[in-house]
């Protein structure tokens, strides 16, 4: 399987947009915002650099250090946005988590903050570029598990794979 840079840029652009919507849930930690900025730079044509990976790892540390579950999920959405540039072209269900993860974590963050996960998913689906649907269809079905994040994953993956959209 091959993934072009254009496909990875489209995925990363969408992932960054999803993550940016919940960035206000992390007001006191600049690391998730830096990861989203780095993702947007790649999506706009920049190179995949060590700085992009470093930003992703820093956002992951922010997620681990957050005491608020909504902030932690929002930081994980930022991690996924920066990491989208490095999606592996390996036919593995695990890679599907990297595709839907930023939108899934944004929906979870919104829900944990007292908002609507369904509305966040609806927004993500309304903004998804066709390239992301095409990328997802190259991979086998994901294995999201039985948790609430798993249910959000299933909703996103099913809608993204749908031929009706």
Image (cartoon, rainbow, N blue to C red):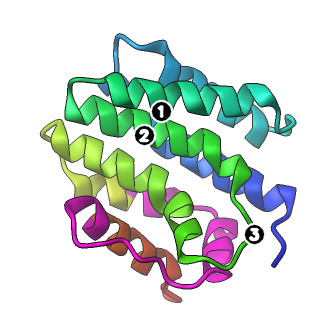
Residue bounds of the magenta highlight:
123-151
> Does residue 165 appear in this view?
no
User: Farthest left residue?
Assistant: 114
Q: Is residue 140 above or below residue 32?
A: below
Q: Earlier in the sequence, mark 3 or mark 2?
A: 2
Q: Tell me the CA gap for discs 3 and 2.
A: 22 Å
Tell me where residue 153 appears, x and y as whole percent.
36, 67
Disc with the residue nearer the chain's start (3 vs 1): 1
Q: Verify CB contact (< 8 Å) between mark 1 and mark 2.
A: yes
Judging by the rendered image, the residue that carries numbered circle 1 is 60
Task: Please report the residue visible at 31 percent of the width from the left and 51 percent of the height from the top.
Answer: 107
Mark 3 surroundings: few (<14), some (14-19) or many (≥20) residues within 10 A: some
Front residue of 15/71: it is: 71
Q: Which image quarter holds the N terminus?
A: bottom right
- The image shows residue 156 at horizontal and vertical percentages of 40, 69
- Residue 81, above or below 103: above
Residue matched to label 3 = 89
**The disc label shown at residue 8, or none:** none
In the figure, is residue 146 to the left or right of 102? left
Reading the image, the residue beneath label 2 is 76
Circles 3 and 1, Cβ within 8 Å, touching? The answer is no
107 sits left or right of 156 in the view: left
Magenta span includes 107? no
Task: Give the mark toward the camera: 1 or 2.
Answer: 1
Which residue is nearer to you in this view: 151 or 15?
151
């Amino acid at each position: 399987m091959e993934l072009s840079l254009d496909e990875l840029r489209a995925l990363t652009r969408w992932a960054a947009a999803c993550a940016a919507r919940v960035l206000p849930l992390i007001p006191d930690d600049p690391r998730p915002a830096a990861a989203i900025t780095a993702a947007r730079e790649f999506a706009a044509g920049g190179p995949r650099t060590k700085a992009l990976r470093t930003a992703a790892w820093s956002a992951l540390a922010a997620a681990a250090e957050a005491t608020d579950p909504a902030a932690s999920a929002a930081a994980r959405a930022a991690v996924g946005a920066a990491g989208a540039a490095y999606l592996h072209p390996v036919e593995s269900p695990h890679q599907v988590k990297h595709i839907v993860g930023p939108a899934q974590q944004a929906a979870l963050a919104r829900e944990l903050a007292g908002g609507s996960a369904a509305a966040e998913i609806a927004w993500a689906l309304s903004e998804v570029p066709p390239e992301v649907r095409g990328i997802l269809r190259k991979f086998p079905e994901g294995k999201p598990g039985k948790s609430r994040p798993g249910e959000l994953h299933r909703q996103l993956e099913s809608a993204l794979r749908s031929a009706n959209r």
